[in-house]
Structures are given as C-alpha cells and as structure tokens.
Amino acid sequence: MGPDVLAPITVFGSVVLIVWIVYHHGAKNRREVLETVRQAAQSGTQLTPEVIKALGMPQKKKGGDIRAGIILLAIAAAFITLGYTIGAVENDFEALGIMAGVASFPGFVGIALITMGVLFRDKSKDAE
C-alpha cells in the first residue's frame, strides 16, 4: 500500500475515529446518568427537574434545528466555493458542477432543518 492509498485512508479513518470517540463518551455519560436516576427511583427518592438537570442530562437548546441548518448551508456554500476555486485554478469549471452536486446534500438537509425549526418551534417558550 503506497502513500497515495494510505493518506486518504488515514484522513477519513481519523475522522471516523473522532466521531466514534465523541459518540461513545456521550453515550457512556447518558448511561451513567440514567443508571443514577434508576437507582434513585428504586430507592423512592423524589426527582425534581432541577435534580435531573444537575445530573447532566442534555437539554435541547432553543433554535437547535435552525443552528444546525445554518451550519449545513454554510458547508454547502463552502463546497460550491471549493468547486469554483478549483475550476478557476484549472481553467475548467467541471469541478463546479461536481461540487455543486456534493453541496446539494448538506444544503437540502440544512433547508429542511431550518424549515422544521421555524414551523415546529414551541410558541409557549417564545412568549417567556
């Protein structure tokens, strides 16, 4: 296996490894919190929302879908810009079409998340 094969495998493998580490740590933390809640419920301890929040249960952030959608749209714009830049350097704008196709995936998911965030936001929390 030469460097032309090993380099991309290393780059993509490291991304997968980082995502797995973050996911594994989060799942382990949630499992430990739920075990603590289970033990408290079995012993008859009263669990208030403040206690559960103090234990570290993740809270859904206000506007999370909209934020994620904006980030995905920015990633889509970055892919299109990359395609344009490659086309300008090579003086062949075929890369722009290819990168626009790649950008359509995060772009459409971003549009869907923004739409869901706007349409399904909790009106009662906005009044507070």
Image (tube, rainbow, N blue to C red):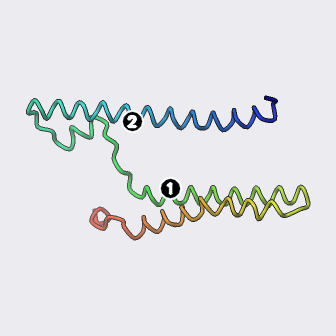
User: Local crowd at mark 2 within 10 Å, few (<14), some, or many (≥20)?
Assistant: few
**14 on left or right of 85:** left
Above or below, comparing residue 21 to residue 72 in the picture: above
Q: Residue furthest right?
A: 91
- Label 1 and label 2: CA atoms lie apart by 21 Å
Q: Secondary structure at mark 2?
A: helix
Picture quadrant where residue 88 is located: bottom right
Q: Quadrant of residue 107?
A: bottom right
Q: Looking at the rendered structure, which numbered label has been put on residue 27? A: 2
Give how far across and how far down residue 102 sits, in percent.
68, 59
Q: Residue furthest bottom?
A: 119
Horizontal and vertical percent position of residue 71: 56, 55
Where residue 38 sits: x, y (%)?
A: 19, 34
Q: Circle 1 sits on which residue?
A: 68
Q: Earlier in the sequence, mark 1 or mark 2?
A: 2
Three-letter code, disc 2 = Ala
Q: Given the image, on which type of amino acid does mark 1 rest?
A: Ala
Above or below 119: residue 4? above
Q: For the residue labelled by badge 1, is the local secondary structure a helix, a strand or a loop?
A: helix
Please identify the quarter of the rendering in which residue 78 is found: bottom right
Which residue is found at the position 76% from the left and 55% from the top? 82
Q: Going by the image, does 63 lie left or right of 105?
A: left
Name the residue at 57% across, 33% down. Answer: 17
Q: Residues within 10 Å of mark 1 (few under 14, many from 20)?
A: some
Q: Residue at x 13, y 35 (%)?
A: 41
